[in-house]
Structures are given as C-alpha cells and as structure tokens.
Amino acid sequence: MFGFIWKYSKRDQLVLLVVTSLLFPLLYLTLELPKRIINDAIGAQSSVVDVFGMQISQVMFLWLLCGAFLLAVLCHGLLKMRINTMKGILSERMLRRFRFQMISRIMRFPQPYFERVSQGELVSMVTAESEPMGGLMGDAISQPVLQAGQMLTILGFLFLQSFWFGLAAVALIPLQAWLIPKLQREINMLNKDRIKEVRALASMIGESAAGASTLRSNGGWRYRMAEITGQLGRLFDIRFLIYQKKFFMKFLNNFITQLTPFFFFSVGGYLVLQGSVSLGALVAALAAYKDLSSPWKELLAYYNQTQDMAVRWDVILERFAPDGMVSETLFVDPPEKIPHLRGDFVFDRVTVHDVDGNTVLEDISATFPAGSVVGITASSAEDRRVMAELMIREFVPSSGKITIGDKDLSTLHQAVIATRIGYANSQPVLFRGTFGENVMMPVMAEPHGQDTDEARLREAIRAGNSSDPFGVDWMTPSIAELEDLQGLRDWWLKLIEGTGSESDLFRRGVEQRFDAKDHPELAKRLIELRPTVQAAVHDADLDKYVFLFDPKRYNPGLPVGENLLYATPRVQITQELLAKETDFLAQLKALRLDQDLLTLSRDVLDLLRRTFGLDGTDHPLFRKLGLNVKTYETAVELVERTRKGGADKLTPAELSILLTVPFQITAEQLGPAFPDEIKARILELRQSQSQNMLKVLGDLFAPLDSEQFVPGRTVIENALFGKISETAGGKADEVHDLITKVLAENGAEQLVVELIYDLDIGLGGVNLPALLAEPLAFSRAAIKRPDILILNKALASYDIATQVGVHKKLRDLLPESTLIYLNDSFEREDVFDHHFELKQGRMVSDDMELDSEVESAGGADLARKLRALEETDMFAGLNRKQLRLLAFGARWYTATKGEVVFNKGDAPKDGAYVLINGTADLFQPRSDDKDELIATVGPGALVGELGLIRDEPRALSMVATSDLKCLRVGAEEFLAVVENDAATAFKLLQVVAGYVNS
C-alpha cells in the first residue's frame, strides 16, 4: 500500500512534509512567548525594559509580546488548516485514482470470474471499503511527522522550563457550542450530497461490472470510463468543499481556544501589574496549558489505522487481481487505424476450462471461411454461451489457438475486437440511458472535441483518471463506414426493418411523448392526420370510448387544472411548482374557486385514504394515479387540520399541496365522487378567466388547439386530439389498434419508430420487454457493420418465420461479413454454408466418439452421465457446473423386461428416472385387476419428478416393457437444481401444465 502511495504521490508527500516542518517553529513560539511575557515583561524589575538596545516601557513591552503571541497562534492555526486541507485534497485525489484503477480492472476481469464474485462485493470494495483508505493515503507521511514533531517540541520545551503550562480555558465554550454546530450543519448537508453521489457511483459501477463484456465487445469502455470520470469529479468537488469548510471550522475552533491564553496574558498581566491579582495565581492558571497526550493518542491511532488499512489493502488486491485478466496493453493506446478481420476464423485444438478447472470446451478444431454463413447447433446453453464468448475473447483458451486470417485473437487490441466483431444474444446487458445510446455504443469509440472545463480535466489527469472528456460528441460514424449521425440513424432503421421488429417498436412508439422541436416532421404529420383519425374512430362506432378535446366540454380524461385552463402542462405540475405561482393562487382565491377545489381535494383524499390507507401507496392502482406519495401523505395531514381549524389558516405552500391533487387526478378516475356542479363551474370559468390565468402562469401551460401540437401528450393522443377512456376495457385496445393502423397507412410508421431512439431505459433495462431488448441487442451488434457477426439465439422470442426472414435480409445488409448463428436446433441446416454441432463441449459428427479421450474410468462414467442428462429437455439448459453436480449424484439403474421399477403408492425417495435405453409403461392400477395404460415412455424421458416435488407417494406404476437402462437422479440433488435454477423450474412448470392439460 505504501508503495502505491509513494509511487503516485511522492512529490505531493514531500511538499506536504516541508510545509509540515514549518509548523514546529511556530509551535515553539506559542510555547516560548508566554514564558517571555511572564518573566521578561510582567516580572521585569523596572518600569523600563531594554529591547535590542532600545528603551521601552514595561507596559509597551508587554503589549508587544502579547501581540507577537497572538500573531504566532494565528499563523500556526492558518498553517495547520492549510496542511489539513492539503492532506484532504491529496487523500481524495489518491482515493479517486485508486477507485478508477479498480474500476479499470473490472473492465479487464475474465468473464468466468464474475461467476465467483458478486457485483455487490465489488461495489462495496470500490465504494465503502476503499473510503477509509483515502484518509490514510493523505496522512501516510505527514501525520506521523506532524504528531511526533509536536510531541518532541512540547517535551523539549517542558524539559527546558521545568514546569507545565496550559490550563484548559472554558470561558469561550458557549461561543464554540453555538458557532461550531452551525458550521457542522453545513458540512452535514454536503455529506448528504456526497452520499447521493456515492450511491450514483455505486449504481454506475454495478452496471459496468454486469456489462463489462458488452462494453468490451462493443467498444464502449472509453466512453464509460469518461462518464465515470465525470462522476468521480463531482464527488471530488463535493469533498473539496467539505474539506474547506471542515478545516476552516477546525481553525476557528482552535483559534477561539487559543484566545483564552491571550486574555490571560494581556488582561491577567495587566491586573498583576496593577496589584489586583498575584503572579502566582496567574502562573497556576497556566500550569496545564498544553496537553501532551493529544499527539501521542494521534500516533497510536495512526498506527492502528495503518494496520487495519494494510489488511484491507491485501483483501482488495486479492479480489482485484484474478488470474486470466486481459492485459492492460490491449486496452490502452488503440491503433490509429483499426484493421479489418476478413480472414478465415480458425480454431486449432482449442480447449477451455472453467474457474474450477473443469473442461467446458474440448479440442475444438474448425474453420469458418471468411464471408460465409455458419450455423452451430448446441443443445446446451452453456456450450453456446462459452463458444460465442470465446470468439469475442471473453473466454481465453486454456490450450490451442484461435486466428482470424493472419491475426492471433489473443493479441488483438480490444478496440479491434469491439469494432470488427459484433455479438448479440437474447438477454442483452442494457445500461441506463436511452435506447439510442445503448444501440450506438459501438460507434461511440472516441471523443470529438475538448473539455471546456480545463481545471477539471487537469485534476482528472493528475488523479490518474481518464483524460477523455465526457460532455462532448462521441459519435464516430466512420466505424460503420458512414459520414454523419443521420446516416447512422438511417442505417439503424434499416437494421430494425431487417429484424422484422419495426411493428413492435411502432406499437411502443405511439405511447411515447416527444418534443415537437426535436421531431417537427412527425408533429406536423400528426396534426394533418387528426381529421382522418377522428373520422376512423367515428366510422368504427368507437366515439364513446374517447374524450376529444373540446373547448365547450369538460374532458373527464384531463385533470381539473387542465380543464380549467383548457391547456396542457409543458412540465410536470408539482407542489413546489404551484407554491411559486403566488399570483395564480391569489387569482384562484379571487374567483372563489380555491374553496371548491379544496373541497374536491378533501373528498378525493378521503376516498383515497379509505381505499389505500397510508401504507398502501405501493399498490399498482395507487401508482397509476400518478400522485406523489409524499404529497399524498402530507395532504392527508393537512385535510385533518382543515377540519379542525378551517382552510383560512393554510400557508401558500400548504394550499399548493392540497391543490396538487386536482391538478393530477381526473374526473374519470374519481367517478361519481366528482360532482357535476364543479364541472359546470369550471366550464364557466374557462370561458371567462382561462386566458387571464394562462398569462399569469406564463410558459408552464400550452393552450389546446386543434391546429397545434399538444406537448406532454403521447403520439396516440396527439393524433386523436383527445384521450382514450381508461374505463373502455377491451374497446381501448380497439381504438389503439385503429389509430395505429391509420398512422401506418398514412406513412407515419417510420417517423414514430424513430421516437424509440430516445426511449428512456432504466437500470439494467428493467422497463424494456424482450421484444424490444432483442432488436436492440441485434442492432447494437450490427450497427458498426462488423466483419464478423455472432448471434446466439439473438431473436429467441420471434417465431421461426421471422427468424428465417431475418437471416435472409441480414445477408443482404452485410454481404461481406462472416455470419455465425448459434442455436439449440435449426429446422433447415442446408441454409448454411457450413454447419457444425457442438455436443458436450466438443465438435462432433456421426463418426466421432465423444469419450475417446477420457482420462479414467471414473471420468468416462461421469461423461456418459453428463451426456444422458444433457439430452433431456428438462436439464439441457443447466450450466456445466450444475449439470456436473447432478451427474455426480446420479446412479445407473437397469431393469429387465416385465420388471416393476416402482409401484403406485411407493415413497418417491429413490428419485426420478432418466430413460437411456428401452421403453416402459406407466399404469394406473385398477381394482378389477385390469390396469389402465396411461403412457409409454422411451429414451430421454424423465419419470417420477412430480412425486419428488410434492413429496407424495407415486401416482402411477412403472413397468419395463423391454430391457431398460436408466439414470436415477436422487431426490436431494433434483430438488436442489429446481430450487436454484429458474429455467429448470419454469420447464418443470410447463411439464406440470402439460399433465393438467392432458
């Protein structure tokens, strides 16, 4: 740890050491001057004192010495504040460097390592566990020198004087008790901001750890590291303010504490001269002036801290230095020109082991010719994943070699792989941002422009962070052989059309809200199509399921505030926003509408409280109301106050909280609870006062106009110029489909699909369904026009016809690329130029023997068990480790023809049976001695699993109808797999559903 500190902060540590050494003369002065004041000024034998040959009065000499003491204390305090601030900045700078290096290492972790280390553990180490280490990095050299120096200085002085000085003064404690907490509160507020930023950093780190493979393969690591640099910079700024305020507070506290000796020396000395008090009393008051124990305690604390941090350092290093890390040289200094990878993809006797040393892929030898279409069939999801990620170097061969043309895959710079090889699967890792930002990750390869904040850039470089600016344009269209961003978006739309997912994106796009300034053509088209859309709704007899915007009618689908103004908000209306509109609130009172709205708010809140209470705000129906939980809870309390003391005593802020309710909830949501009298009054006031109120509100609301775009409303609502009723049920879907059809028929489909580019994606893509996530992954892999495109069940949720269509279109879109498809099966293998089968980790054909090279009889037996389990639908999707554990506990079972395997009513403890060879009948015994045949099962079938799950006796009898060979899976092993593997549990649910259906 000290090697790291010295390597990266040697210059700063030495400067800090020199500044610290300047503190000791000032410390000695603060000890020496009191003695001089007592002995040479107060204790002078005459009224005139000789000072450097000059004759001055005793009183003047006293004041000179007291002034010098005060100046020494002030300089000592200021210098100490400066030292502490320097240490704080150095600590934060080193911590920032340390965290950046840890996150950089996460980007280079081998993919299998993430299976052993949790994201939470990595996040904790980078954030919470590394935090205390920052303080030690700043104190590493200066702290022991400072404390030991202070201690030696005090000891030397005391030995020279033969008595103790210093008595803790309490006179100014009340001032300190008032002033210091006040300053501490400001620091606490900054600490709260710091915690928020640390949490944001933790979230970013979690995303980066989960998506390290995606960032590498798509070339997004530099952009990601620049984003992380920005977040670390915000943390640095907050900590810098904290250090300034914190050490100013300490300086002030120390200065106030040192004022007491000044008063003792000046006022007390004067009183001694006047004869009011004795010199002995003054000396006694100063006897315990300095506390020697403080530096000693600090030295002990420093020793304990170094020991604790040394252990923590070793633990962190152990986690952040795994075997098989991608070399740092393959990440830094990318080549100026990225070479193409258009040669044959050759695997030469490649073997891959997992972290436990087990073989995952064995002796893979194959050649994928450049520009060909290759299909790889692998029933095991684990085999497919490892094979695919082996081709993008997420897995590194334990032996053998992979080359692309004349280039060794293991020596290629990561930027080359990220640019020239595309990879997509059915479960892509997504990052918080927009749909477009996720799609365009591969072409956001480098920044174009300079950081305008030069000071922040210099600090980032000084802290060893990325020098890439985050707030500039990162788009590099040349990667995809295009010229500009518009060309990239057009290419993305072609890819979307090629995947056949345009209709899915279109259906999602019509629910989007957008700014007309960003999409003027779409806004204009929607306005033009309004008469057509409304006519289509009328012709379909669906009028009663929509609420068109009409200046003469109350719209139940709009909140009260929007009906009153006949306008829609440009921004979300919140309590804070309403509280600022004092003129608007005053106008409501003048119109006597505030009481009506407050009454309505009371009725609404009473209804909500009876329905949801105060603890039901997490219910989906409550969330659908769009009412802020905190606002709701506060409003409920205010309603109780108005019942007791009336509404006249409400402050403007409290009034705005209650008025937020009618500005967010519609009459349709309330139903009969919304009286017709208020509707009529609102319409009356709309005609007479809406224009005046809109003027008062400024740009907060946009008037509803059939010839203008309606901001804040969806594509559907703008096309309709109205809202679909929430109570329409299935008819709402009919209206939705009808409007969507009209838009598509009139050429608006592509304009709407473009809105998906700006669709917000939450953390981990939780708000994005698979039907949208899969085309995102596909287009992200293909957007850069890769030389090699690898698709691992990338469109798994699409039907076979769509997948076939994608394969055909993809060849046209990327005519020169090598296309590699991996799937559990293909209906037509002849569509590929070359087809391979991956079985139990090996490339096989009809004449190959799988277990010809096993190491021992035990290994051969385990291999046969693995193969048997892997060929069953139930266990085919298990990863290799789970499959191996299941096979290890399984036992072979044989039965001759006619032998009973188990009877109805038997306990299921012997386990479930996987049939390898032979057949068996499942019977339902009857009392008339004629058993009913339920089913005949053959190789690959799994029998008896339901009895294990339900822990009930066998429901059927099983009898061998030929010589039978089975693999018996024990109850404990089977249940462990079901409990720990969601995919297996889901398959089991499907099996049970099949039983119920039959």
Image (cartoon, rainbow, N blue to C red):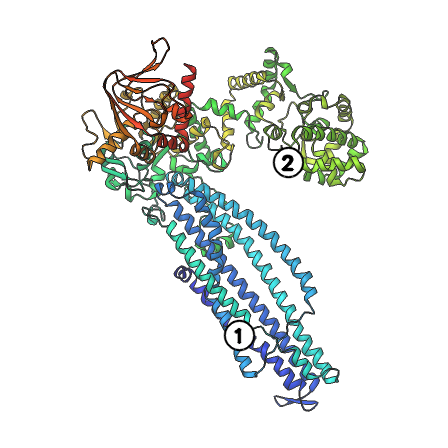
- Could you tell me residue 368's position as x and y percent? 25, 31
In the picture of the structure, the residue carrying the numbered disc 2 is: 629
Residue 874 seen by the camera: yes
Q: Is residue 966 left or right of residue 568?
A: left
Q: Is residue 91 above or below residue 586?
A: below
Q: Is residue 925 left or right of residue 891?
A: right
In the picture of the structure, the residue carrying the numbered disc 1 is: 24
Q: Residue at x 40, y 17 (%)?
A: 995
Q: Residue at x 80, y 34 (%)?
A: 589
Question: What amino acid does circle 1 point to?
Answer: Phe
As helix, strand or loop, the secondary structure at mark 2 comes to helix
What label sits on residue 330 in the rendered view?
A: none
Task: Count neighbours of disc 1 (C-alpha within 10 A) and say few if under 14, some if 14 to 19, many if 20 or more.
Answer: some
Q: Is residue 562 above or below residue 961?
A: below
- Could you tell me residue 387's position as x and y percent? 30, 34
Q: Where, quadrant-wise, is the N terminus in this rendering?
A: bottom left
Q: Is residue 253 left or right of residue 397?
A: right
Q: Where, quadrant-wise, is the C terminus in this rendering?
A: top left
- Could you tell me residue 599's position as x and y percent? 77, 30
Name the quadrant containing residue 185.
bottom right
Task: Count neighbours of disc 2 (C-alpha within 10 A) and say few if under 14, some if 14 to 19, many if 20 or more.
Answer: some
Q: Are marks 1 and 2 in contact (CB under 8 Å)?
A: no
As helix, strand or loop, the secondary structure at mark 1 comes to helix
- Could you tell me residue 322's position as x and y percent? 34, 48
Camera-near label (1 vs 2) is 2
First in sequence: mark 1 or mark 2?
1
